[in-house]
Image (cartoon, grey):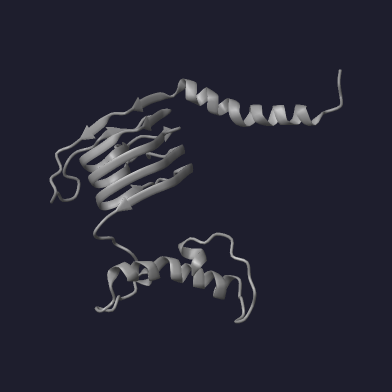
Amino acid sequence: MRTHVTRRDFLTTALSVSVLPRLAHAQTATSINGRTFRGTRTATGTRGEGGEGLRAKSDVVIRNCQFLDLGNGAVRVNTPTNGLVIEDCKASNLYRFLEDTSSDKANPAILSNFAVRRITAREIDRGMIRIRYGSHDGVIEDVAAFAEYAVVDQSQVVPVPADMPLDRAALLACGVITGLGAVVNTAHVAPGSSVVVIGTGGVGLN
């Protein structure tokens, strides 16, 4: 029996531990791919008008789908759900994209081991995602929503002077403040100092 563990043994074991569960999930998951879910919500719809797109189930992958004119939940989680993946989808005119609300109060709709990624949504009335009931072990990434109105805490609001062009105000609100804050408050760079900036996007240039 061999007692010496080589680097190759270690890497092979590590890859098996990390990759095999994902491969097993990919083989057992149900895929909903390339479908369009359309509700009855009007352009001036209120609250949950328009109906749901679909109800989530465990080990389901929802990919490359469109969700249009729907109410409270393009995707609705109403029972405990594990292994849900939603990716590469687009949505428009919704009350909320992902809604986590139990159908039975005695059976909380806990969402676990989930992923929501690369979602683009427009005209979202209430909010993009609501997850609750102690849901855990999830990943949300590359999710973008566009709305004319948003409800935020007063600490996140700064009045814009009436004579400030909105296209310039938008730049000041993100790139300038983030870059300046990183230099002054995080790195504490003194005036006249020499520094190296890696990356010259909106934040780096400022």
The reply, left or right, for residue 196 in relation to residue 83 is right
For the point 59% across and 65% down, the residue is: 197
Q: Quadrant of residue 4?
A: top right
Q: Is residue 19 left or right of residue 173?
A: right
Closer to the camera in the image, 10 or 174:
174
Q: Nearer the viewer, residue 142 or 58?
A: 142
Where's residue 38, x and y in %?
20, 35
Residue 176, position as x, y percentages in the image: 45, 70
Q: Is residue 119 above or below residue 167?
A: above
145 in relation to 64, above or below: below
> Dividing the picture into quarters, in which one does residue 102 lie?
top left
Quarter of image, res 147:
bottom left
The percent coordinates of residue 6 (x first, y second) are: 81, 29
What residue is at 31 percent from the left and 67 percent from the top?
167
Residue 75 sits above or below residue 121 on the image: above
Which residue is depicted at the point 39% across and 36% down? 86
- The N terminus, quarter of image: top right
Question: Residue 97, position in %: x, y?
Answer: 30, 44
- Residue plotted at (34% across, 33% down): 64
Residue extending furthest toward the top: 1
- Residue 67 seen by the camera: yes
Q: Nearer the viewer, residue 63 or 84?
A: 63
